[in-house]
Amino acid sequence: MNIKKLYVVRHAKSSWGDANAADFDRTLNDRGKRDAPVMAKRLKDRDVQIDHFISSPAKRAKSTCKAFCKVYGYDEKDIQFIDALYHAPVDTFKRVVASIDDSHASVAIFSHNPGITEFVNTLVPGVHVDNMPTCAVFAVQFSTEKWEDFLDVERNFLFIDYPKLSS
């Protein structure tokens, strides 16, 4: 059996400065631009390996994902953008995870609230998060050959980390 790891990442803090900007086009604010590479480095310092990045195409999620890719030395042109991850409900997250190519052992998915909080709360019985803060990372692992089986196997909570959590 192979160990698969899933890192669910909420986009970093976004800007509300431009009242005319569509929600999809909101950019990261200064704190978000600082937090994204810091969180990526914290993961890397924990020896977290990520071999595939999937993101909502919304500007704030895309920018957060790109910051993680830069820290990981990953080519951002290889990010898999999935339109359905923009304000996705739980079932969409489940479908996206089930569709991940089985050659990937460790995947990070970047998306939005409220769906991301609702999704992580379905992953491990007894582990509940009131709210995924901006740039939070929720990590689980499980044993399976195929990502499509992830809902049918026991998933183990690894950690949650976010910028305001003291390390």
Image: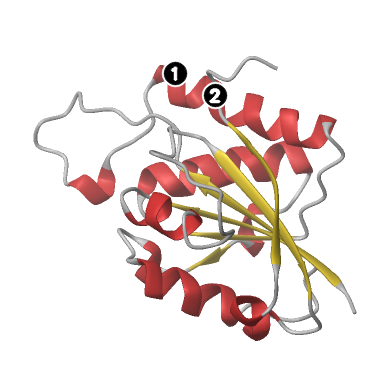
Is 21 in front, or is 103?
Answer: 103
46 is higher (above) or lower (below) than 35: below
User: At label 2, which amino acid type do we have?
Assistant: Asp
Q: Residue at x 67, y 45 (%)?
A: 69
Question: Where does the image place residue 2, in percent across and percent down from the top left?
Answer: 88, 74
Question: Where does the image place residue 33, in percent across and percent down from the top left?
Answer: 49, 25
Numbered disc 2: secondary structure: helix
Q: Which residue is mark 1?
A: 31
152 is higher (above) or lower (below) than 105: below
Numbered disc 1: secondary structure: helix
* Left or right: where 125 falls relative to 48: left
> How many C-alpha atoms fall within 10 Å of the one at disc 1: few (<14), some, or many (≥20)?
few
Location of the N terminus (image quadrant):
bottom right
State the colouring used for the structure image.
Answer: secondary structure
Is 158 in front, or is 102?
Answer: 158
Asked where in the image residue 86 lies, by quadrant, the reply is: bottom left
* Left or right: where 71 falls relative to 53: right
Question: Where does the image place residue 3, in percent across and percent down from the top left?
Answer: 85, 68
Q: Residue at x 53, y 18 (%)?
A: 164
Q: Which residue is mark 2?
A: 35
User: At label 1, which amino acid type do we have?
Assistant: Arg
As measured in the structure, the alpha-carbon distance from the residue carrying label 1 to the one carrying label 2 is 6 Å
Question: Where does the image place residue 150, in percent across and percent down from the top left?
Answer: 65, 76
